[in-house]
Amino acid sequence: MLVIWLNSEVHPLTGYRIQSDRKVAVCSVHPSEHATLQCLGCVKAKIPVAKSYHCSPKCFSDAWQHHRVLHDRAASAVNENGNEEEELFGRYNSSGSGVLNTSLSGSASSASLTNGSTPLYPAAVTQRSGETWFEVGRSKIYTPSADDIGHVLKFECVVVDAETKLPVGHPNTLLTSRVIPAPSPTPRRLIPVSGLDAMVPLDPDGRISSSGTFTVLSYNILSDVYATSETYSYCPSWALSWPYRRQNLLREIVGYRADIVCLQEVQSDHYEEFFAPELDKHGYQALYKRKTIEVYNGNSLTIDGCATFFRRDRFSHVKKYEVEFNKAAQSLTDALVPSAQRKTALNRLVKDNVALIVVLEAKFNNQGADNPGKRQLLCIANTHINVHQDLKDVKLWQVLTLLKGLEKIAASADIPMLVCGDFNSVPGSAPHSLLAMGKVDPLHPDLVVDPLGILRPHNKLTHQLPLVSAYSSFARVGVGLGSDQQKRRMDATTNEPLFTNCTRDFIGALDYIFYTADSLMVESLLELLDEESLRKDTALPSPEWSSDHIALLAEFRCKSRPRR
């Protein structure tokens, strides 16, 4: 505990790295373990050296199926342009982390201390144990660099008199465990589903090089209030902490370079203090809808909601609609439920879920010669449907309420639509059927749960929007490089991904991107992950992937069609 006296100030933290301690390589699969062997194939292929280390022959053998992908991609990149390291790893490896630098030159490191001001004390300080500590920074925040990997760090905080600038009392010190490389998952690639079926290279900005298309990302990022060690005990505590997860999530989101980003489970304080300002630096304008707080009894700052971001150079904001299912529940009960039962009905229906609907105008030409100069509008709905599995009627009612609202917008404007989010509904469930088929079979088992009678008559469970799930395109595309692998990650009976949520206790698809098929066509999709690669860390979240959901991304092109 640090005590600050009146008329005193706290000197910035001084960081030291132990110099006499031999640098230790760490396992690329289990970063808490020391490496005992190195893959020479990685060295020869010039794959970042941190990915070449393993802690045991069994570790290397178990990881080989996924490790060999690095070799294949490195060879492929050499064949294409000879710049394999930038092609494969440039999007995710931030400078100064994740790559093991075998040079231990103290003089080289001391020449560029980027984590603070010029040292006031000698760089090397010898402790009575005989160990030599090398000063690496002098600031209130220190970001470990590649040179720190394998070393122990010591942080020293001194209280200094504000007038004399002399130290007061003894310094407080903190020792870390050995620094490990920042996990860097293999980048996910976009796979075309129309035209030539081959992996799509990204331009230097990370975006598909096509002026007439746009990309949409949907991602439940796992709110910090839900990311507890009790729920995700298999995830290391450091990888579950918000300071780590937020940077990893930001790196992933920015790496996709999507034109439109729909995030769920974004805490209001994290939106204001982190995501909005950070994504603003990357050219995004932000819109947000916080969940209502009639049920939630925690800190109002930490309640989550839906955030939609769009690139200012690609779109401009036209209109915003906010859907509060609590208000819809109040209107429904006032109209249909006898007064004596309204309290019970509201207790079941009021769950604080929301949706954010945004209308944007494209700044790029997406029309063609037959519609020169016509405004291209786009409507994007971003939602997070109630999670409770025993409230099947509430889930379906929320989805129906959202779709009826979108139908009203469609009736007033000839506009392509996207419906994105975490629907907490597996393929084949009533909410998914309503979205994908436009109706629900009256004999669907989910309709049995309807204590309030809000789903009757069942013939009202319909909508007229021609919605299709974007990822179902993988099931329709021809066999070829990339798409064949993705088909194996799809459920052949539902034409949806096998999973978008993967925890120790559950695996299944809950997240979707739906689009109006009469006005939009899917050009490419972000490749899906395979379960085996995630199970090496038990499940999600993990040091590599910082949410229990995976991100979905689709590239679309508008197509001209007669007015609905």
Image (cartoon, rainbow, N blue to C red):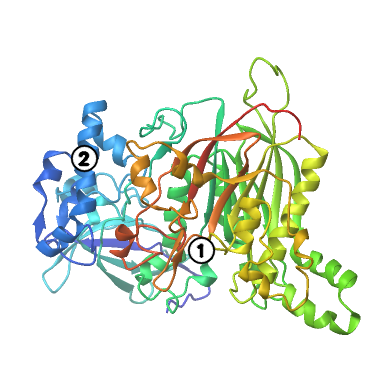
Q: In the image shown, does 33 or 172 lie closer to the viewer?
A: 33
Q: In the image shown, does 40 or 134 lie closer to the viewer?
A: 40
Q: Examine the rendered structure and indicate whether residue 419 appears above or below residue 212.
A: below
Q: Which residue lies under the disc numbered 1? A: 222
Residue closest to the far front: 443
x, y (%) of residue 448?
67, 74
Q: Examine the rendered structure and indicate whether residue 24 appears above or below residue 167.
A: above
Labels 2 and 1: the sequence-earlier one: 2
x, y (%) of residue 476?
46, 40
Q: Secondary structure at mark 1?
A: loop
Q: Residue at x 10, y 53 (%)?
A: 38
Identify which amino acid the numbered label 2 is placed on.
Asp
Query: Quarter of the image containing the N terminus?
Result: bottom left
Identify which amino acid the numbered label 1 is placed on.
Leu
Query: Quarter of the image containing the C terminus?
Result: top right
Q: Is residue 107 left or right of residue 430?
A: left
x, y (%) of residue 177?
25, 69
Residue 72 circle label: 2
